[in-house]
Image (tube, grey):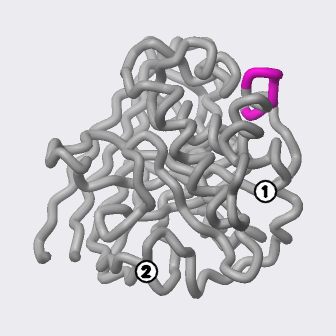
Amino acid sequence: MILTVNHVTTYQYDVPMRSAVQTLRLFPSRFDGQRIIRWDVSVEGGIRGGSFKDGAGDRIEGWSVRGPVSKVTITASGQVETIDLAGVLRGHREQVPPLSYLCETTATWVDDALETLANEAVLGAEDDLDRAHRLSRAVSAAIAYKPGVTQAHTTAAEALSLGEGVCQDHAHALIAAARAVGLPARYVSGYLFARDDGEPHEATHAWAEVHVPNIGWIGFDPANACCPDQRYIRLGSGADARDAAPIKGIALGLGEESLDVAVALEATQQ
């Protein structure tokens, strides 16, 4: 499948800021399931800085905007050819050892309820791959998809307690559950063309990857009860949503910030 993406993020300030600095992780991953046909990232009025690949294999680029700054517009657009690899991250080059993803973060802290969910889910599992699939199904069943009930800072434990959340909450909960039973897991940001019911997905998406010995990293999307396929574009990964954020930045000044995000995905070939 060839997917066309136009992703525009706009930060606006009620009073001009002295300057702004952005760190962008907005570049599709290079692995056997994705081929970049064309891709461009720009910051309106910005100055492009350094670019590098981190230990997880993600490309990161820095930008700065000189003041006075009333608005910062970041655009990522292009075309990516995708192939269904049943969620397996094959051919991806990285240097960070999988065991480093067993460390907890604030967002993926494991409380008693998450530990119970994880341990009950893997009872009778045949192997680690089966355990990973069982954990993903358990999270899907325990947290119903419902926008607006959680916030960016909501933890996996809080989302499980609510029984509702969005893709970020599903990913955090699966990461926490996997780590609770000794499986390394991490957060992945990207795009999703459409859900299984055919409804368009109007924003960036998130899922989790679990490391299974002798196979490698495998993606699981509890929000949609599936593994990533040709409808998904993978951008980058991290220990949690904050670590894997496609955009991180800071603006110097006293203004209040507002955010608007518009994402359009189109399948140009199937």
Q: Residue at x 67, y 56 (%)?
A: 131
Amino acid bearing label 1: Leu
Q: Is residue 198 left or right of residue 163?
A: left
Q: Is residue 125 visible?
A: yes
Element marked by disc 1:
loop
* Residues at circles 1 and 2 in contact by the CB criterion of under 8 Å: no
Residue 138: image tag: none
Reading the image, the residue beneath label 2 is 33
Percent position of residue 215, x then y: 67, 80
Foreground pick, 148 / 144: 144
Q: Which residues are magenta?
A: 108-113
Cα separation, mark 1 vs mark 2, equals: 23 Å
- Kindly identify the residue that appears in the image at 72 percent across and 40 percent down: 177
Q: Is the magenta region chiefly helix, strand or loop?
A: loop
Mark drawn on residue 183: 1
Percent of width and height locating residue 69: 48, 30
Indicate left or right for 104 with 264 as reference.
right
Per the image, label 2 sits on a secondary structure element best described as: loop
Drawn side of residue 159 relative to residue 205, left or right: right
> How many neighbours does mark 1 have within 10 angstroms: few (below 14), some (14-19), or many (20 or more)?
many
Q: Amino acid at mark 2?
A: Gly
Residue beneath the point at 52% across and 12% down? 256
Q: Which residue corresponds to the image point at 35% horizontal and 28% vertical from the top-left?
A: 260
Location of residue 15 with respect to 42 vertically, above or below: above
Q: Is residue 110 magenta?
A: yes
Q: Give 78 or 135, whichever is nearer the viewer.
A: 135
Q: Position of residue 148 (x, y in %)?
A: 40, 15
Residue farthest toward the front in the current orientation of the protein: 124
